[in-house]
Image (cartoon, rainbow, N blue to C red):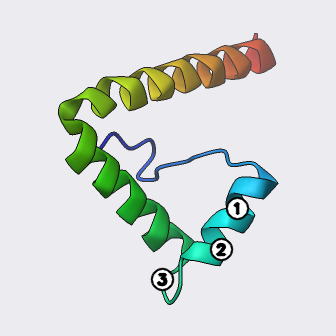
Amino acid sequence: MPRYEDRLCIKLSKSTIDLIDSLRGEFTRDEYIYKVFKKLLDYCGKAIIPCIESTFAEKRLEEAGDKQAQTG
């Protein structure tokens, strides 16, 4: 799974966070999200990777544009 600056950053809505917290049991939120992504990878196979990679590529482009606008 692609990582950006040694982290995987995901934006979640408040309702999604509440759902995760209600389902995660003894796991931390990060551990539970990792388990969900692992299950998705097992279920969807490699089809999920291009979707995640394109999302991260778009995010990197946005951040690069923001940095350039601040310095330029």
Quadrant where the N terminus sits is top left
Q: Secondary structure at mark 1?
A: helix
Mark 2 and mark 1: Cα distance apart in space: 6 Å
Mark 3 and mark 1: Cα distance apart in space: 14 Å
Name the image quarter holding residue 69: top right
List x then y, in percent, for residue 65: 66, 14
List x then y, in percent, for residue 60: 53, 25
Is 35 or 64 nearer to us in this picture? Answer: 35
Q: Residue at x 53, y 79 (%)?
A: 28
* Image side of residue 4 versus residue 24, left or right: left
Q: Residue at x 77, y 56 (%)?
A: 15
Categorize mark 1 by other alpha carbons within 10 Å: few (<14), some (14-19), many (20+): few
Is 7 or 50 nearer to us in this picture? Answer: 50
Please give the residue where the numbered disc 1 appears in the rendered image.
17
Which dot marks residue 27?
Answer: 3
Q: Secondary structure at mark 3?
A: loop
Mark 3 and mark 2: Cα distance apart in space: 9 Å
Name the image quarter holding residue 2: top left
